[in-house]
Amino acid sequence: TDYYLLVTGKNAPHLKAMADEVERRLKAEGVVCYRKSGTAYSEWIVADYLDVVIHFFSADKRLYYSLEDLWRDAPRIGE
């Protein structure tokens, strides 16, 4: 994996919509999701596209898992 994206949604329908839209657009470009875990109602979805892993979180789950702290030494691109 070259990149990790951390995305925060407002609520379960918002998380689902974002994850579904990313999957739809990448699939249209020929990029298929290798593995996906979690659900919008668990407030966390992770989608593995091999080169990019995308974490979709509610604000509470993003704070709880605190992946930014885990990867604090990694270079950041945009915020």
Image (tube, helix red, strand yellow):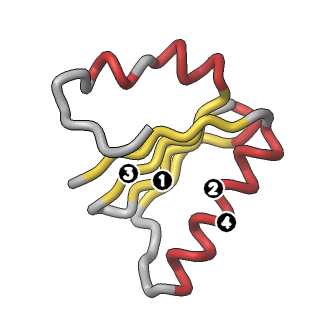
Q: Amino acid at mark 2?
A: Ala
Query: Label for residue 47?
Result: 1
Q: CA distance from mark 4 to mark 2?
A: 6 Å
* Quarter of the C terminus within the rendering: top left
Q: Assign a secondary structure to mark 2.
A: helix
Q: Residue at x 24, y 21 (%)?
A: 72
Query: Does label 3 or label 4 sit earlier along the sequence?
Result: 4
23 relative position to 50: left or right: right
Residue under numbered circle 4: 21
Q: CA distance from mark 2 to mark 1?
A: 8 Å
Q: Assign a secondary structure to mark 1.
A: strand
Query: Does label 2 or label 3 sit earlier along the sequence?
Result: 2
Q: Residue at x 67, y 66 (%)?
A: 21
Q: Amino acid at mark 4?
A: Glu
Q: CA distance from mark 1 to mark 3?
A: 6 Å
Give coordinates of residue 13: x percent, y percent.
82, 45
Q: Amino acid at mark 3?
A: Val
Q: CA distance from mark 4 to mark 1?
A: 12 Å
Q: Residue furthest left?
A: 73
Residue under numbered circle 3: 53
Give coordinates of residue 39: x percent, y percent.
67, 42
Q: Assign a secondary structure to mark 3.
A: strand
Give coordinates of residue 50: x percent, y percent.
30, 62
Q: Is residue 1 visible?
A: no
